């Protein structure tokens, strides 16, 4: 591995290889290793432990995480929301956001804000890498992390009617240099749109300003990335300023989060396939909406640290 990433490196809804076959031309679901699926039946009580649900999420652990994270959310990032009314109070919905920071700070901010303001749990889809890590993988599941596989997303959205958060940029977003901040990378192959169509739920676009400056990447080491078998090894402003402590310490950038109106798709749900042109068109349109919102928020921002 040379430290570079391409679409095949990020096993998310958007970037994995499309399923192919003579009887499935153009199918937009993605093929990833079987072990990345969570083949759990929501009614299977045998897999549950205490308040742990079928996805591994524990409300008690999540509540503890909210309590521990709340001071950072309120006093370090000083998060401000706009448009929270666009997030439904019930029913399934797929939240889609821009992604940034060597160790992304946007996901916990979004999940914490929605859960504390609306009282709804949020499940975050991310790479299988986290689940495979000892201890970290268990904690990640307990706070609502789920491996990004189409079947998992469909069951959460369609069957369980939950809120799901996904970042279509994947590591292309978190791995970009500071000089490229707030320039959205390609939203994969539009897999998140097809999942929303098949599940019969809206997409909720979310724009986040502040995460880019919380842990900005100055440059990356290909050698260390290859040695550690990870997509990239970042050298951040945090480590340059704080030394080893910078590996786990964010800079106090002011966060502003804007929720855009839901995007509904006038197509029947549960179809085997959807037109690729329509899927890509919708994905590009959602990307452009988030990009324009970011530019607008940046134009009105007076200061990185004060907002």
Image: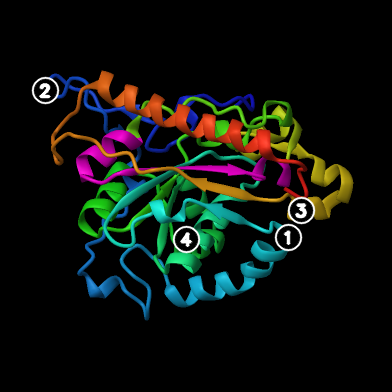
* Image spot of residue 84 (x, y percent): 46, 55
| Front position among marks 3 and 2 | 3
Tag 1 residue:
76
- The residue sitting at the front extreme is 300
- Mark pair 3, 4: CA separation: 21 Å
Q: Which residue shows up at 22% across the image and 52% down it?
A: 158
Q: Secondary structure at mark 4?
A: helix
| Label 2 close to label 4 by CB (< 8 Å) | no
- Mark pair 1, 2: CA separation: 53 Å
Tag 2 residue:
23
Q: Quadrant of residue 118?
A: bottom left
Q: Can see residue 201?
A: yes
Residue 75 against residue 15 in the figure, above or below: below
Tag 4 residue:
114
Label number found at residue 192 = none
| Front position among marks 1 and 2 | 1
Image check: 173 left or right of 218? left
Q: Which residue shows up at 49% across the image and 52% down it?
A: 132
- Mark pair 1, 3: CA separation: 5 Å
How crowded pointer 4 is (Cα within 10 Å; few <14, some 14-19, many 20+) is rated as some
Tag 3 residue:
252
* Image spot of residue 112 (x, y percent): 53, 62
Residue 243, magenta (yes or no): no
Viewer-proximal residue among 303 and 167:
303
Q: Which residue shows up at 80% across the image and 46% down it?
A: 238
N-terminal of the two: label 4 or label 1? 1
| Label 1 close to label 3 by CB (< 8 Å) | yes
Magenta segment, which residues? 192-215
| Label 3 close to label 2 by CB (< 8 Å) | no
Q: Secondary structure at mark 3?
A: loop
């Amino acid at each position: 591995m040379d430290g570079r990433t391409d679409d095949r490196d990020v096993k998310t809804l958007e970037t994995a290889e499309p399923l192919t076959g003579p009887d499935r031309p153009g199918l937009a679901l993605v093929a990833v290793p079987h072990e990345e699926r969570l083949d759990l039946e929501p009614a299977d009580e045998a897999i549950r432990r205490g308040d742990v649900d079928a996805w591994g999420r524990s409300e008690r652990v999540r509540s503890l995480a909210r309590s521990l994270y709340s001071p950072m959310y309120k006093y370090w990032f000083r998060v401000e929301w706009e448009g929270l009314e666009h997030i439904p109070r019930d029913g399934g919905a797929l939240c889609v956001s821009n992604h940034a920071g060597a160790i992304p700070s946007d996901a916990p901010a979004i999940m914490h804000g929605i859960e504390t303001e609306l009282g709804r749990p949020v499940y975050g889809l991310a790479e299988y890498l986290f689940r495979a890590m000892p201890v970290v993988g268990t904690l990640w599941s307990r706070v609502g992390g789920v491996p990004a596989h189409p079947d998992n997303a469909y069951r959460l959205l369609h069957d369980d009617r939950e809120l799901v958060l996904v970042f279509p940029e994947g590591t292309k977003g978190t791995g970009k240099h500071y000089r490229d901040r707030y320039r959205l990378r390609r939203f994969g192959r539009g897999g998140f749109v097809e999942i929303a169509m098949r599940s019969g739920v809206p997409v909720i676009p979310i724009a986040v300003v502040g995460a880019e400056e919380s842990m900005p990447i100055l440059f990356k080491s290909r050698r260390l990335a290859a040695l550690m078998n990870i997509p990239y090894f970042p050298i951040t402003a945090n480590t340059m300023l704080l030394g080893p402590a910078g590996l786990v310490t964010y800079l106090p950038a002011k966060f502003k989060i804007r929720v855009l109106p839901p995007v509904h798709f006038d197509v029947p749900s549960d179809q085997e396939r959807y037109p690729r042109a329509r899927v890509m068109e919708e994905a590009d349109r959602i990307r452009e909406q988030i990009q324009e919102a970011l530019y607008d928020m940046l134009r009105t921002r007076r200061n990185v640290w004060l907002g």
